[in-house]
Image (cartoon, helix red, strand yellow):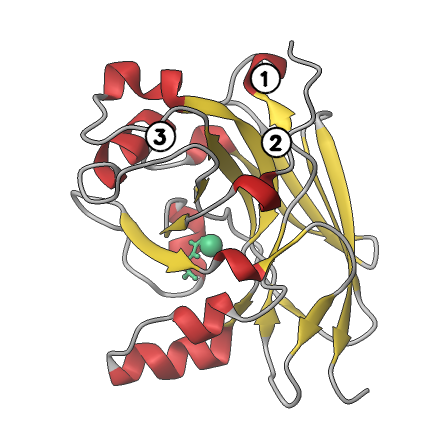
Amino acid sequence: MSSKVIRVKEICRNIIAVGRNYAEHAKELGNPVPQGNPLIFGKPVSSIITEGSIEIPQGWKELHHEVELGVVIGKSGKFIQEEQAMDHVLGYVLVLDMTARNIQDQLKKQGHPWFLAKGFDTSCPISNFICKSAVKDVNNLNLQLTVNGVLKQNGNTQDMIFKIPNLLSYISKYFKLEYGDLILTGTPSGVSAVKHGDVIEAKLDDLVQMKYPVIEHGN
Ligand SMILES: CC(=O)CC(=O)C(=O)O
Ligand SMILES: [Mg+2]
């Protein structure tokens, strides 16, 4: 295993996120499960934090946590074949795809992109980097998230509808993947709203854990 410390926030130039990649999560929000191709969207790199607090913009209600496996790209590629896809992976991070659900719902109704609901500052807290070689089976990793010590999300990457090779192959047809790019692979069920003063803790198997307090501007 490489002992080199990778600071993902410093090397990341693009975040591409996958939505509704766990059937139970799609169901809990009354959304259809994607058929054929993955559902993808973007988050700005400026939304990444590695310390500090998740900041709810003043007056926003219903900020949901979504714990996810993040894939960090190590080798650039376009039109990546599924068979070679894992050669393009440098490692992983645990990610929170923080989502203002009521704003996302309004945007969806208006036919607008989700960017505001998912891309505001601090909406992408990440963990320390995990080297690919430290992960025995990426298709069997437990994702857990608690709020104030209460278990909310408890999923496993084995339930992803589209697995990593499929995702990298699909995404790289349209976006050249570069060193440091971050792919969010979707959240399992159990998402819920957080408020000022809450503390989110998340862990990925016994590989990494992280803790982020939540604050609301104006409090
Ligand atoms: C419904 C969503 O916000 C999609 C998403 O981000 C997911 O992880 O699923
Ligand atoms: Mg998500």
The image position of residue 153, as x and y in percent, is: 63, 49
Q: Secondary structure at mark 3?
A: loop
In the figure, residue 135 lies in which quadrant?
Answer: top right
| Image location of residue 212, percent across then percent down | 77, 56
Q: Residue furthest top?
A: 1
Q: Quadrant of residue 26?
A: bottom left
Q: Nearer the viewer, residue 75 or 139?
A: 75
Q: In the rendered structure, which amino acid carries the disc numbered 2?
A: Asn
Return the disc, 2 or 1, that comes first in the chain's sequence: 1
Which residue, given by chain and number where applicable, does mark 1 sit on?
135
Q: Amino acid at mark 3?
A: Lys
- Amino acid bearing label 1: Val
On screen, residue 145 versus residue 186, left or right, reads right
153 relative to 60, above or below:
above
Q: Position of residue 17 (x, y in %)?
A: 40, 50
Residue at (54% x, 71% y) in the render: 120
